[in-house]
Image (cartoon, helix red, strand yellow):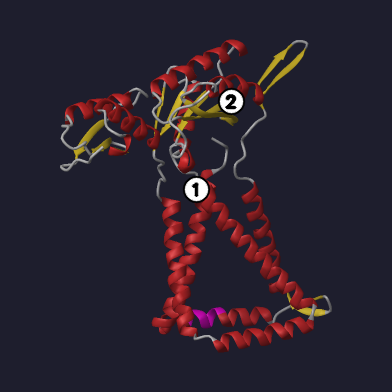
Amino acid sequence: MNSTNRILNRAVLLIGGVLFAAVGLVALLWVWRPATVEPALAVVERSLDDALHGQTAAVFGSDIPVVLLAASAAALILAVALIIFVFARGRGGVHEVARIRADDGRTDVDRNVVDAVLSGALTARPDVLSARTGVFRVKGVRTVRLAVTVRQGASLGDVLAAAERVIRDWDSLLGGETPILIHLTDRGWLGRYRSAARVR
Amino acid sequence: MDRRQQIYRRVLRRETHSSRSAAAVILAALLALTLLALLFLGVWATADVAFRERAAIWLVDIVGAWDLVSVLIAVGILALLVAVLLILAAVLPGRRARHARVTDRVALVVDDGVLADAAADAVARECAIDRRQVSTTVARRGLTVRVTPTSGIRVDRDRVERTAIAAVSDAGFVTAASVDVARDGVIA
């Protein structure tokens, strides 16, 4: 539900895949069909040699080819771009579930409020193992994700009816309708060992 | 289509398909680390002549000690395998095992495992057999129920089918069921 750019994810994977494929093909062709690779490698080697013996600049008292400096700068920029890419994943979560403006000010409703109203009511049910909420901005609108893990043997219809009831309570409390996604999630491997009944 | 329906459509699309973030983050982090390590070594080698000479000797020793042909074959095959995995991850839709629908008020996503559990629980209750004697698999187009009956007690295939379908439709999903009853029962 976050705002991660998924096309960019796939573009990075595709570019990585093409790079790995090129490396793999060159390595295997070098062994099995050297005649097909060697002319190309000779051209690369010659151009690299020309570049490395071209214009130089003094760095730390050594003469470094300008081409090498440019390649290092490009590598640094690429590394920084990749780090930014890594830290830009999973964004889109917001702290306020609603922002109500009035003539005399503004009221922000924290996401803990929606969590207390929705998750609190559902977690108290014996057929629900856990419930948690998250608030995300989707197409510019604050949208609530309500993830519910049901106990083994629970009637999904009953749990969904209960979830819709607490959502109606939330709507009347807020005075409007927030888009809400209900996600009934698997219990996971640990949940398989939990009891099918809750003892109070 | 109103604004809320547009939001639900987008949300359901994203919830039922893999984001590929984990794979992309791992690849990007590895590439960034490799680039930074190479840059660090390059700067060190430029600033420290002794390190440069030691590194050159070490590299010559390593290359001399390895069988270059075997290394190239291993690297080539490994790189091609990784390439295939990455390209498939980039191109395939990455559909998650989930069912989704929109109600009057909310968007709903249910993991297939939850539907399968609900169907299996309902069938076990209806047939009065142990839950471990029922296994269900939910796929996009239908669900499969496998029942191992208790020895001497007949299991009605139609009843199993009706019960499984009812359990899934309890969550609002319409599906077809195929039932497989084991020929040999177990002692419960």
Subunit that carries the residue with mark 1 = B
Q: Nearer the viewer, mark 1 or mark 2?
A: 1
The disc placed on residue B188 is none
Tags 1 and 2 on a common chain = no
Boundaries of the magenta span: A39-44
Q: Are marks 1 and 2 in contact (CB under 8 Å)?
A: no
The outermost residue toward the front is B187
Q: Position of residue B142 (x, y in %)?
A: 27, 35
- Give the structural element (helix, strand or loop) at label 1: loop
Q: Amino acid at mark 2?
A: Val
Dividing the picture into quadrants, the one containing residue B47 is bottom right
In this rendered view, identify the residue nearer to me: B28 or B99. B99
Q: Amino acid at mark 1?
A: Arg
Residue drawn where x is 59% and y is 31% of the image? A136
Q: Position of residue B180 (x, y in %)?
A: 20, 39
Residue carrying label 2:
A141
Q: Is residue A69 visible?
A: no
Residue carrying label 1:
B20
Subunit that carries the residue with mark 2 = A
Position above or below: B26 against A91: below
Q: CA distance from mark 1 to mark 2?
A: 24 Å
In this rendered view, identify the residue nearer to me: A17 or A62. A17
The outermost residue toward the right is A61
In this rendered view, identify the residue nearer to me: A36 or B103. B103
Residue drawn where x is 42% and y is 78% of the image? A29
